[in-house]
Amino acid sequence: MEYQGPIIDCDVHHRWRDIRDIAEFLPKQWREYVLNTRLAPPPVHYPFPFGTNKRLDTFGPNGEPPGTSHDMLRSQLLDKFGVTHAVLGYDVGEEMSHPNPHYATAMASASNDWSIANWLDADQRFYGAVLVAAQDPQRAAAEIRRVGSHPRMVEVLFSDCGASHPFGHPVYDPIYRACTELNLPVAIHFGSPTFGGLAQMSAGGLPLNRLDYYTLLNQAGMHHFASFFTQGCFDRFPDLRMVMLEAGVNWVPWVLWQLDAYADDLRCENPTMTRRPSEYLQSNIWISTQPLEPGPGIRDQAALLGAVEGLEKSLCFASDYPHWDADEVDYIQRFLPSDWLPGLFYDNAARLFKLPERVLS
């Protein structure tokens, strides 16, 4: 049976059309900097299929970059699939992975001001993310307090690079303290270490090609995920909510089982951890579905995820629009049980973002 209710999409990418659009929100020093240099950190070069990592149909009629048009986003995602809430997360936020923390912090502030000015009032279905540069946690916390009270900001977003520590480390506590003060969840979007070189995304070194890259992308997610337990982050901030974006989901069962298996024997090294890692899943952790990784059988995905008690209450739909491997609503429904769908498409994310409960007919 197809799901017919409201839909929250946790990972939609929007972007400025031209560097001049974002430059106007920067202080004079950094405005001149971005107008006279390349805006983003130089990425490791992995050839994209057809020269882009975006769907070819998401480019505008005059070649406008994907994710820059309100109308195209409405017609290709919101109206087509009945998405009632789209959380806009920039184009991964890779500018925040720049090794210069002063520049990255300025870009975060400018990005937030640009998003508020150009998107959040354009459609009542658009919701914002407070983008921060985690390299400087104190200034990141100040940015959260500066714009986080905006009524359409529903999360704090950073890419997976930061201060060269996994995100459960106490060095990031100023960020989580600000998040809890404003009752905002923190979202970690994966895929940025290849841009700024502040962290390594895969265990054996840099991926050799794009097949390597996509297959190993979730390794960084596993490390960050585990650190929230092993570093006692949820014990320091019991009300903190965290969602992982674009890290996949099939690895979650075995990582949780591995953590639980060793937690009791090694608890002396983690004196602040008061519960088994799997228990935090029910109260502190949400995980987006993109990219969904179904096995050869139509029921394999549900069988794997269903082996972890309560995991279905932490799953949130994410399309990853307008990327080439975006997951559409109809595709997701094929692999998961029908009784999971109301939670997946709305209820779980509504708890995460503190949005109104679904109205039952």
Image: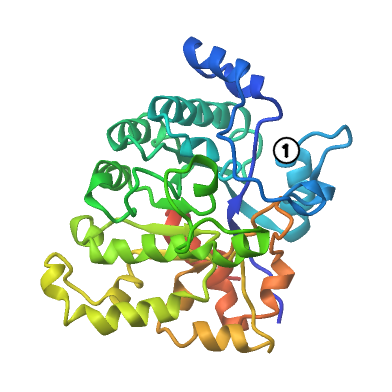
Q: Classify 10 Å Cα crowding around label 1: few (below 14), some (14-19), many (20 and above).
A: some
User: x, y percentage for residue 37?
Assistant: 60, 20
Residue type, numbered disc 1: His
Q: How many marks?
A: 1
Look at the image and tell me whether residue 93 can be seen.
no
Residue at image x 32%, y 42%?
182
Counting from the top left corner in percent of width and height, residue 170 is at 22, 50
Q: Is residue 208 above or below residue 306?
A: above
Q: Give me the residue at 58% from left, 16% from top.
A: 24
Quarter residue 124 falls in: top right
Foreground of the two, 167 or 40: 40
Q: Nearer the viewer, residue 266 or 109?
A: 266
- Residue 341 drawn at (x, y percent): 59, 75
Find numbered disc 1 in the image and state the secondary structure of the residue it sits on.
helix
Q: Position of residue 134 (x, y in %)?
A: 37, 40
Q: Is residue 90 left or right of residue 327?
A: left
**Residue 138 vertical position relative to residue 224 in the rendered view, above or below:** above
Look at the image and tell me in which quarter the C terminus lies: bottom right
Residue name at image x 37 percent, y 60 percent:
224
Residue 215, image quadrant: bottom right
User: In the picture, which quadrant includes the N terminus?
Assistant: bottom right
Q: Which residue is mark 1?
A: 70
**What residue is rendered at 33% in x and 64% in y?**
284
